[in-house]
Image (cartoon, rainbow, N blue to C red):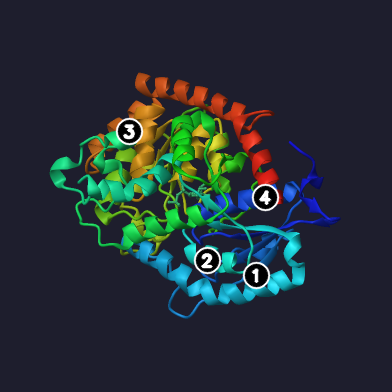
């Protein structure tokens, strides 16, 4: 990698301005990008909403600029995906005027020439528009896969060709234009006509990328070479595949919830590859029924487990204690641990973890891939179905639980993953993928080269 002085301009550090979307799965990669750019000599200013605001005390090296939004636009985090989409659309619009004022003040202070660019989450189109009006170049960060963004681009075509809205009878139909996706893997509301908000969300993200000076993706060549080539054909802006970002900069602790580190001691006492790690990320919510089937499936499998039961993870309940079925603790005593939030990257890196039961958020998926941990896939919404499809059918490092959660099927799936021959083969393939990821992030690897290109691009804008 090039030296720190890359970002120094006219004897002054170049400033980079960042604006993450305020959800955990978007904040984490943006802060990793911040760490990477800071290490390369940029000074970092982070704009943020009060909703899910970062804690400046944990990042003394950055400057934080809160952007006011009108009352009623933010928090608490909604449980249903439709509401998350509505909240994202509302947040972007609500930030617009407050951001304009704050950005103008920052530009006056730093001097326009010292600011390299603003990097915003692709879901914040109004931020791109305001920034462009103030003649500051923008770059878009998409925190999902390249395949997922190809799906965003293809959305109008999916309607034109009749794949969407989804018809129950066509759920298993392959989408030949987006191999290996089937209709059920697309970013859609299954069993429901699209009500326009998702279409708007995706169209806005596409516009944000097209009006920007480049697209930054938290993915890498070993995972998505073909998909990246496709995006480079379809887009006129440069695409920087600089992932996996969490491997490029130290954990800056951008966690919104307190991570319970005691689970690492618990894992220390377990044999290698013996334990199942279970987590469904920061937004997915399950029904009380699914929680019961999940719990008894885990209990019945006989496999040691570390389970993240996030407060509010079960629809209609806000307290962890109330969420686990009676008798579960006694049935699994000494064999499992339940925490409200885990240091996930460290957990996945732990030698005791033999499998990950995941919702397949893109961060969780890449974190698992990078540690060679095979996955049991249980996607909920958004890009998660598509990610699970890649895990099972392209990289072959996991499989979907499938269908309605039922304790017998869960038990069998867990055993297959942790103690089965099948699971061992997936673990071996995951180990190969881990090595391929290491090559991408090593000296001269594709992601390293992409980072150099990104920095050269930023300083040339
Ligand atoms: N995470 C964590 N502790 C947990 C569960 C998740 O730190 O107990 C982190 C995880 O490492 C990942 C992020 O939260 O970086 C979740 O992002 P992802 O894209 O997987 O899912 P989302 O939360 O956006 O659905």
Q: CA distance from mark 3 to mark 1?
A: 42 Å
Identify the residue under disc 3: 179
Q: Nearer the viewer, residue 235 or 384?
A: 235
Q: CA distance from mark 3 to mark 2?
A: 33 Å
Identify the residue under disc 2: 129
Q: Is residue 421 left or right of residue 258?
A: left
Q: CA distance from mark 2 to mark 4?
A: 18 Å
Identify the residue under disc 1: 65
Residue at x 67%, y 28% (from the top left corner): 444
The disc, 4 or 3, on the residue closer to the chain's N-terminal end is: 3
Q: CA distance from mark 1 to mark 4?
A: 21 Å
The local crowd at label 1, few if under 14, some if 14 to 19, many if 20 or more residues have their Cα within 10 Å, is some
Q: CA distance from mark 1 to mark 2?
A: 19 Å
On the image, the x and y values in percent for residue 159 come to 24, 50
From the image, state whether disc 1 or disc 4 is nearer to you: 4
On the image, the x and y values in percent for residue 390 come to 38, 34
Helix, strand or loop at mark 2 = helix
Q: Residue furthest left?
A: 169
Identify the residue under disc 4: 458
Residue at x 59%, y 66% (from the top left corner): 131
């Amino acid at each position: 990698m090039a030296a720190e002085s890359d970002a120094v301009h006219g004897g002054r550090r170049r400033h980079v301005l960042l604006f993450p979307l305020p959800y955990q799965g978007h904040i984490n990669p943006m802060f990793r990008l911040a760490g990477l750019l800071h290490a390369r000599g940029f000074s970092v200013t982070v704009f943020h909403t009060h909703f899910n605001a970062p804690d400046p005390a944990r990042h003394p090296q950055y400057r934080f600029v809160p952007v006011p939004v009108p009352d009623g636009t933010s928090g608490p985090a909604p449980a249903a995906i439709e509401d998350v989409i509505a909240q994202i659309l509302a947040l972007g619009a609500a930030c617009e005027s407050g951001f304009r004022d704050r950005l103008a003040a920052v530009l006056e202070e730093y001097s326009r020439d010292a600011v390299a660019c603003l990097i915003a989450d692709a879901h914040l189109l109004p931020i791109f528009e305001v920034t462009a009006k103030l003649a500051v170049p923008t770059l878009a960060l998409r925190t999902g896969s390249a395949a997922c963004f190809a799906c965003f681009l293809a959305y109008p075509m999916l309607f034109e060709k009749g794949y969407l809205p989804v018809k129950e009878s066509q759920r298993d139909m392959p989408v030949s234009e987006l191999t290996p996706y089937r209709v059920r893997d697309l970013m859609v509301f299954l069993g429901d006509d699209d009500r326009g908000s998702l279409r708007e969300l995706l169209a806005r993200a596409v516009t944000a990328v097209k009006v920007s000076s480049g697209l930054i993706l938290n993915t890498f060549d070993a995972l998505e070479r073909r998909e990246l080539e496709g995006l480079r054909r379809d887009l006129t802006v440069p695409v920087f595949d600089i992932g996996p970002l969490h491997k490029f900069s130290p954990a800056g602790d951008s966690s919104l919830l307190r991570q319970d580190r005691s689970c690492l001691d618990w894992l220390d006492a377990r044999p290698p590859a013996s334990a199942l790690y279970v987590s469904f990320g920061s937004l997915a919510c399950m029904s009380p029924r699914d929680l019961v089937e999940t719990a008894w499936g885990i209990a019945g499998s006989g496999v040691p487990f570390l389970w993240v039961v996030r407060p509010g993870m079960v629809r209609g309940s806000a307290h962890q204690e109330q969420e686990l079925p009676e008798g579960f603790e006694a049935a699994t005593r000494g064999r499992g641990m339940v925490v409200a939030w885990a240091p996930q990257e460290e957990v996945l890196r732990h030698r005791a973890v033999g499998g990950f039961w995941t919702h397949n958020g893109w961060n969780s998926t890449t974190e698992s891939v990078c540690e060679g941990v095979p996955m049991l896939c249980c996607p909920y919404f958004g890009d998660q179905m598509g990610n699970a499809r890649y895990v099972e059918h392209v990289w072959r490092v996991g499989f979907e639980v499938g269908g309605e959660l039922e304790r017998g099927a869960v038990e069998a799936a867990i055993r297959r993953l942790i103690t089965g021959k099948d699971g061992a083969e997936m673990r071996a393939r995951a180990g190969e993928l881990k090595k391929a990821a290491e090559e991408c992030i090593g000296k001269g690897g594709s992601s390293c080269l992409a980072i150099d290109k990104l920095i050269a691009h930023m300083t040339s804008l």
